[in-house]
Amino acid sequence: MRAVVVEQPGGTEVLRMQTLPDPTPKPRDVVIQVDSCGVCFHDIVTRNGTLKAGVEMPVILGHEISGIVVAVGADVPGFRPGDRVATVQRYHICGHCAHCRTGFEPLCEDKLFLGDAGLVGGYAEYVAVEHDNVARLPEGAALDGAAITACTLGTIYNAALNVGRIRAGETVLVTGASGGLGLMAVQMARLCGARVIAQTGSPDSATLLRELGADEVVALPRGEDFSQAVRELTAGHGADVALDNVGTPLFQPLRRSLAQRARWVLIGQLTGEFVSFNPAQLFLRNISMLSATSTTRQQLVECLELVARGRIRPVIDAALPLAQAAEAHRRMEAGSVTGRIILKPAAEEALQ
């Protein structure tokens, strides 16, 4: 099979096409012919060396995968060749630890992350994933949108409902609202009945953000303090919930944008930088700092149903051939992507 392999961390030049043996299924594996693979900022920080934990080089990047089952292992129930499927972000969990048994399998200490641990990722024509990390697509769910459902919508579903517990009538501030996570966060917060303030550094995305459910859009250049605008839009109250897809670069303005008793849900971190703050700035106002990471398979199943019924719309900025993975990374790093870029390994010629 053809696959884009990273031998050592570096710039986009380290994304190199190679020919590797097709995967063969181990007893618990589903082998998927990759239709679409989303390009996540996680891929960027794995490629450039910012992310080190759990990364084993050489690596095939990509954890946002959809495709067609072509083979199954001897111990795989419920899947057969021809099934349309999508994956969560992992290719292995133990299945029996306390996290796995209680619906928190993204925290499994034995987990192996797709696109981090060796030559198992979606920037390839085929990938083998253990079956308990795969979900069948419902009628009405397209393969391209399904690829990005687990990482974007699934993570936000987890953050908004399970962690942030958004209630109807609350004001929700979404940072990085033009990105893959942000666009899903705007839609999910709206679906929860919240008033949505979308923060973005991309003024060109304001129309789309409003179409997807943002009541207000605060568009300022990256790094500028948006807290005063948020305060004005909320009559000085601030946001009740923050779905924070950016992390350190927006830490201080986001902190100043929050209401008393707000829930601050950390979802994304775009840099390797640390931040300093006085804890009293949070606890004197009874602000809860929370976090949400990844997606369970059950959450993926529920999110695919939302997509199939048209309640949530995956936003795809561009579909590129696998050979243009470096171009996809360049666009991501430039901040010029609205939603997600997907790579299409099975459609090279049609997309050239």
Image (cartoon, helix red, strand yellow):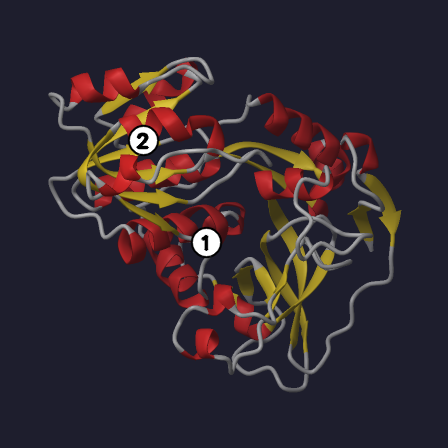
Dividing the picture into quadrants, the one containing residue 99 is: bottom left
Query: Which element carries disc 1, helix, strand or loop?
Result: loop
Q: Residue at x 42, y 68 (%)?
A: 104
Residue 265 lies left or right of residue 19; in this view the side is: left
Q: Residue at x 46, y 50 (%)?
A: 149
Residue 91 lies left or right of residue 182; in this view the side is: right
Residue 56 lies left or right of residue 144; in this view the side is: right
- Which amino acid does the dot numbered 2 rest on? Arg
State the residue lying farthest toward the bottom.
75
Write down the residue under mark 2: 255
Residue 249 lies, with reference to residue 163, above or below; the image says above
Is residue 91 visible to us here?
A: yes
Mark 2: few/some/many CA within 10 Å (<14, 14-19, 20+): some
- Which amino acid does the dot numbered 1 rest on? Thr
Q: Position of residue 13 (x, y in %)?
A: 82, 31
Q: Position of residue 182 (x, y in %)?
A: 40, 35
Locate the C terminus by quadrant. Answer: top right
Q: Residue at x 60, y 29 (%)?
A: 332
Mark 1: few/some/many CA within 10 Å (<14, 14-19, 20+): some
Residue 136 lies, with reference to residue 199, above or below; the image says below
Q: Residue at x 28, y 25 (%)?
A: 210
Q: Earlier in the sequence, mark 2 or mark 1?
A: 2
Which label belongs to residue 111?
Answer: none
Q: Nearer the viewer, residue 332 or 107?
A: 107
Numbered disc in front, either 2 or 1: 2
Is residue 40 visible to us here?
A: no
Q: Position of residue 72 (x, y in %)?
A: 66, 76
Write down the residue under mark 1: 293
Locate the N terminus by quadrant. Answer: bottom right
Q: Nearer the viewer, residue 115 or 2?
A: 115
